[in-house]
Image (cartoon, rainbow, N blue to C red):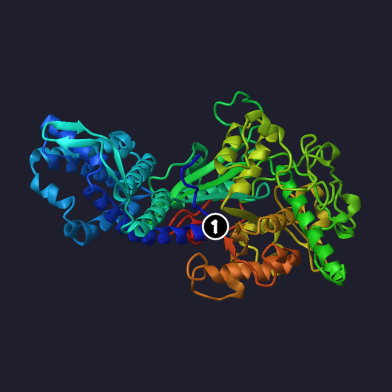
Amino acid sequence: MALFPSLTPKNRRQRRLLFFLSIGLLLAAGVLVIELLATAWGSWGISRNALRGAMNAVGVPATFFYYIPLGVFVGLVVGLLLDSFKYIQGAVIAVATLIAIPTIFLPRGVFIEPLATSFSPNTVLTALVAAGITLWAGGVTPDSLATKPREYPKIPRIMFRLAVVLVALGLIEAHVAYQSPVLAVSDGVVLRPFVFEGLDGTDAWAHFIGAAVLLPSLRYFTTYERNLNVIMIGPKRSGKSAVFGGIHLYIRDHVDPDGQAANRVSTLRQSIENGQFPDPTSSSVQPGSRNARGSQPMLLELPYSWGRFLPTRVRFSAVDYPGEVLGEILDEVVAEARRIAQGQEAELVADGGDPSDFDVPFSDTGEDDESDGKSAAVDDDGGEWDAPFDDDPEETSESLGGDVGSPESDPTPDAGGDFGRGENGRPFGDHTDDGSRLFGGTDGGAENTGLDPKASWEQATQAVREAANQEQMIPGVRGCVHNADRIVLTLPLDDFVAPIIDRETVPDYLQDRVVTPDEIDDHRWTEIRPIEYNGRTYAIKGPDREDLENYLLWYESLQSVYPEKDIVIVGTMADWMLEDFRENHPTDDSPHADAYEDFCEHVRDEIVREQTGAINQVFGGRDADPLYLLWYEIENDEPAGTNELRIDTSGPASVLKGARQFMERINE
């Protein structure tokens, strides 16, 4: 059990406020504790007598001893200064010590005067040896100095434990009056009876308050780290892989050149550097898997350091998984959101309201029963914005006719029901899903690995790494969502192209992928994704994906169940909307620079919300949350086929447009 309880709150802003508060408390309490130690040292208790007697016995000058704690202190401060994430703490302690020399040590005649009287090469060497031993004990080695970022978690622990011992000993020596059983003499020590003489209350209140404030402040101050765990989720073929590769490229070039990423992420980045979209990734198998032929998920991780002062250790993660599994990952969230919504409805009715007047998004309604959807193929998130769409010969080849999207033509369960589930409406067999509480029950995958994914981010990511199949992967991704500080929801903007088709502002190189209402009957259902807009049916040629209604329901459920989490919505494939923005907002400013906010608002309000009013709740209602946009500029001027689109990598700006604004938002 920890000696002191953690002071770390869950809210990151509160953590930062507490950190700066701890600096003030530490400085104020430090003055009182230094006074305490000076008083204790002057009392000649058992500790000082024993120390002086030992030094007399070996013939070492008494003042020689002072260089040992000096070396230990210097070693601890240097260890903090060398830590990539704690050097600010080291600088604060060093500055506070320099201030304490003329204000406390010199007036009291302690520590500095003995150091000055015994200054010599031998004493300096002693201090350096003590500092070196302290650094070694804290994990600072030549090999560790060559790595970036550098982290030495042992240094704060050593500092805190030494502070606890010194404060406890100081309180005893300063406020317990006794005759020491050990008395220092010229050639060692002599023993005598211990005599308790009483308690000394001089300045006791100040010393006890200083100790009570300093220890927890020091613990929080020296162990404070700005860690940020980010998980990006979204339907399959929504551009997550392309985003990951582009963000890695941006981080390497503009943020953290020394940041390391998994081989898979580096491969994505290299494809983009070569002007190519990453290959679509089907359910991937991790290197070294025992089941090399099986379907195994892969955790994409992008660790980096953000910020110069009080840098943040960020772990940006996404999981390669079959797209339809997202519904199973979030089915407990949806169940919990329905329970919350039904409870709100009951309360409103009890207050005399008419439930029909309220929009309860997760209650069972007839409208949910009529929502349409296509069954999704088991495939992973595509690397390209628009991966090639292959016809499935086993699917129906009937042409679209009549009412597109009608219940009769939709074999998939409704969006409000047990979408993407197996037997008995439960994914991969039976498990508790009664909505009584989030993560109710134990998932088989977690049992097999012995991990509790909801307990921490580390256990959740480990569960994903060790997953040998989809069933074992799902609890891990749920744990990532549960423990993330920020959740990034990808919104594939090619699901919202009906307004720009209607306004004839589709970019030239994408003209071959759109289907107007007049052309609908010329295409098979398996070739297109229909989009209803203003009573007409538009469509886009492209890879199959979860129905829009499905993943909007999942996103809204996340916001309902996790209102305390910071959720960021990012629109991928925003190059679809560039021409429409330029046509309707004439400006010389670049959409990825000065006009970025205008571009984001245009896409959100005049395209996305214009086409699909139901998305308003995902954006937070009338006072809409911002939509961040990411896209690649394309070299092609004319339709060239999906596999032949080339990314424009020229220019000094980030290849992934919008990356700077997106990363500033993620890391704020």
Instruction: Left or right? Give the position of 97 relative to 420.
Output: left
Residue to which mark 1 is pinned:
11
Image location of residue 521, percent across then percent down: 84, 56
Q: How many marks?
A: 1
Q: Please state the horizontal and vertical placement of residue 193, each as a whole percent of the image.
A: 26, 35
Residue at (52%, 52%) from the top-left corner?
A: 647
The residue sitting at 37% across, 53% down in the picture is 211
Q: Nearer the viewer, residue 184 or 370?
A: 184
| Residue 359 position within the rendered picture, expressed as x and y whole percent measured from the top left | 80, 66
Q: Residue at 39% of width from left, 51% of height from top? A: 215
- The 10 Å Cα crowd at callout 1, few under 14, some 14 to 19, many 20 or more, is few
SS for callout 1:
loop
Q: Label 1 is placed on what type of residue?
A: Asn
Q: Is residue 534 above or below residue 18?
A: below
Q: Residue at 55% across / 29% down in the picture?
A: 287
- Nearest the eye: 328 or 592: 328
